[in-house]
Amino acid sequence: MRNRIAIFVAMIQSILFLGHWFVYETWIHFWGALHGASSTIVPVIVALLSISFVCASLLAFRSFNPAVRVFYKIASVWLGMLNFFFVASCCCWIAYGVVWLVHLSVSRAAIAVTFFVIALLVSIYGIINAASIRVKRITVKLPGLPASWRGRVAALVSDAHLGHVRGAGFITRVVSKLRESGVEIVFICGDLFDGTKADLRLLAAPWKNLSPRFGSYYVTGNHEEFTDPSKYLDAVSHSGIRVLKSEKVIVDGLQIVGVHYHDSTDPRHFRTTLQNANVDRTRASILLTHVPHALQIAESEGISLQLSGHTHRGQIFPFTWFTSRIFGEFTYGLHRFGGLSVYTSSGVGTWGPPLRVGTYPEIVLIQFE
């Protein structure tokens, strides 16, 4: 296990080295060579920035003190900015090729300044956008829905990623929005925590201020299973949220099935878990599971509505494109898979860079018809 972790860290660090090198060399080529002290200082700063996120992440798995949290936030913001500076660097070379082909009189410095300033502005927008939680309202019609549930509103919250970047203050804002909306039941579909070392009970404590009529229900995501998930389950339970341990509960006639992340990754085990839940196909059922995959299994086992997260809708460009290639139309939003309705949330928090460009953070309010 340690060898695999070391190889993974080495691969990530190598990619970050190459990314920083490409951005640095692009800037030097277009702006001009550095002179004097800057020719030494700037490369050192770039080298330190290239190792900042990996170092901050390793520290975050061992400590939750203020210094580490500040370091992790700075490194995470820089990682997001690097993404757009990398895109800007690619645009510089493309624009340079176009200028050369059509013989335009545009300096290389002007090209670099234009694209790098745009990248900086996009990064600033991404930080602001990621901190601005939206409330999205959808309507879902489920066959076999008990009459008592018609018109009621449920909330879906996923991917808060509480830890070194998003803390108790952030989840307090989420809880406040839920209280204002007057939801009657809350579904939390994994990655409530980021998976790093943290004061988990402190981070989960704001949920105690929310008492929906029919309760709150939670299943784990992949980040809660980086290590032993029991500490996360304990913190969630202590905050008054019902942990669904790959089981079914019936709430005022509505079937709610919760499947933890590790029970959903193997198709055969996932199917067995749903079969053991004994879902009544003649009545409406809701499945809480972190990842929007194996939909054919949920559909074949008679689930009416699946609620998931995980994808973040890609969170920032160009990863939005990669995510859509992996999950297709189920990357985000409400869609149909045969007789199964599926809603995949873009999540309320962020992982890694606290930026969102091309997506937005959301709490989903689901009104049943």
Image (cartoon, rainbow, N blue to C red):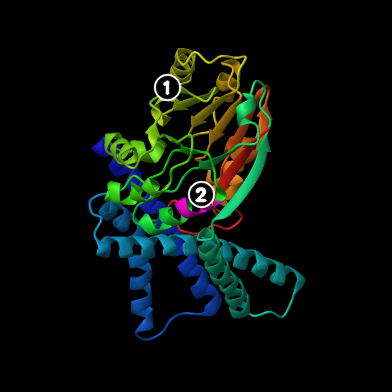
Q: Return the mark for residue 247.
A: 1
Magenta-highlighted residues = 175-180
Residue 265, given in percent of the width and then of the height, sits at 44, 26
Residue 88, given in percent of the width and then of the height, sits at 57, 66
Q: Nearer the viewer, residue 52 or 293?
A: 293
Task: Report the magenta stretch's main SS.
Answer: helix
Magenta stretch holds residue 313? no
Residue 315, given in percent of the width and then of the height, sits at 54, 51
Question: Gap in Å between the C-alphas at discs 1 and 2?
Answer: 25 Å
Within 10 Å of disc 2 (Cα), the crowding (few <14, some 14-19, many 20+) is many
Q: Nearer the viewer, residue 90 or 257?
A: 257
Quadrant containing the N terminus in the rendered view: top left
Give me the residue at 58% from left, 37% from top.
326
Residue 149 appears in the rendering: yes
Give me the residue at 34% from left, 36% from top.
225
Within 10 Å of disc 1 (Cα), the crowding (few <14, some 14-19, many 20+) is some
Q: Nearer the viewer, residue 160 or 254?
A: 254
Number of numbered discs on residues: 2
Q: Label 2: which residue?
A: 178
Vertical order, 206 against 293 (above or below): below
Q: Amino acid at mark 1?
A: Glu
